[in-house]
Amino acid sequence: MIAYRRKTLANGLTVAVNRDRASKLAAVNLLYKVGARNENPARTGFAHLFEHLMFRGTRDVPNFDLPVQMASGDNNAFTNNDYTDFYITLPKDNIETALWLESDRMQGLDITPEKLETEKRVVIEEYRQRYLNQPYGDQTMLLRALAYKVHPYRWAAIGLTTEHIASATRTDVENFYRCHYHPSNAILSISADMEEERMMELAEKWFGEVADTPHVAEPIAQEPPQRAPRREEVERDVPATTVTVAYHMGGRCSADFYTADLVSDLLSGGDSSRLYRHLVKERRLLSSVNAYITGDLDPGLFVFTGQLLPGITPEQVEEAFLEEIRSLEAGSATSYEIEKVKNKFEANTLFGEINVMNKAMNLGFYEMLGDLGLINREVALYRAVDNDAIRDFCRRTFREENASTLIYKARP
């Protein structure tokens, strides 16, 4: 159970704080509600580019990392399709250093032509290294493009193409900054051994005077229901063929989310899971296998993927995946299996609450979902999933017309 207080400042900034009496560190997390889903299809990769630019200094603080290091702190960030997250951990006595730095770059980012060109080159090189110049690098991109035809989840956080970043102008970037990086589009969350009222006072001190620049957000195109199966085959210079099958499912706040998460753990939660036991150890169809959910804010994907052993055909693996699905639809999951997965989820949740940074991050994440109280209700919701819910979810989700299958073949 995470105790918290929540407040919205006059400029629209949401603040959530937690007192952690067991930690000597303070965690400051700033979440901006902007990710790849908020980008223009002709200008993708901007949220990720801004993750880089936000560390390039402001008009008042040319070197962001130096004050953090002088305060004995550590900082980092990440971007995904739904949001961008910046976080700092440091001794609690130095917490104002983190608040000063974050409030400063919320309004004072110094986007010079030189800094922009430098970070554009860095992002383009990252794109090439991670997605173009390594085995299986473009696999997830191909799967996104196959499964989504309208929604911006059809591209990864790094963007559709390097050309979108290469052609980005300073005006483009400054407009994106003004549109998305302001108080009413952000959530500040703090966890530290400090009175909650004091943390609220510090948030007001450092962020209360930051001017808000709200913009009317463009509506996000929602993906229509998939009415027919999709299939794509590609050949690449890779050591082994992989088969990936993706099914559309509900979003992070949907009623199905916890059932989907439990089903993915039943299928692929370690060496004792169903897919590993049946398809890797017993039938020797695959060298590795996984089943996972994307966990996106908007409706996401339930994904099966496996790497074939020599002599095995994609059709054999596709049929093996369907057999495992039919087995769950028939109610074959035992009480022991289900309870084991639930216990693992609860244990991971409880252990995660020990870490002060996890607490701050989770406060921001659940506030972004629109239900901060969910942070303390998820275990109960997960535990409420039963075999009937599993069977119903599998029947509704794992339908032939809802499947997008990518065969990523090893070139002979």
Image (cartoon, rainbow, N blue to C red):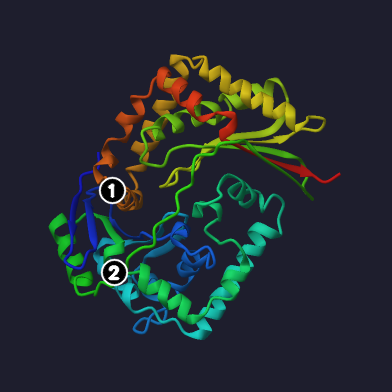
* Residue 28 left/right relative to 158: left
Residue, x 37% and y 24% (percent of image)? 385
Q: Nearer the viewer, residue 80 or 21?
A: 80
Kind of element beneath mark 1: loop
Q: Position of residue 351 (x, y in %)?
A: 36, 39
Residue, x 20% and y 44% (percent of image)? 3
Residue placed under numbered mark 1 in the picture: 370
Q: Position of residue 97 (x, y in %)?
A: 29, 71
Residue, x 53% and y 65% (percent of image)? 44
Residue placed under numbered mark 2 in the picture: 214
Q: Is residue 211 above or below residue 30?
A: below
Residue type of the residue flagged with mark 2: Pro
* Residue 200 left/right relative to 353: left
Kind of element beneath mark 2: loop
Give the mark, 2 or 1, whose residue is nearer the N terminus: 2
Q: Position of residue 114 (x, y in %)?
A: 53, 85
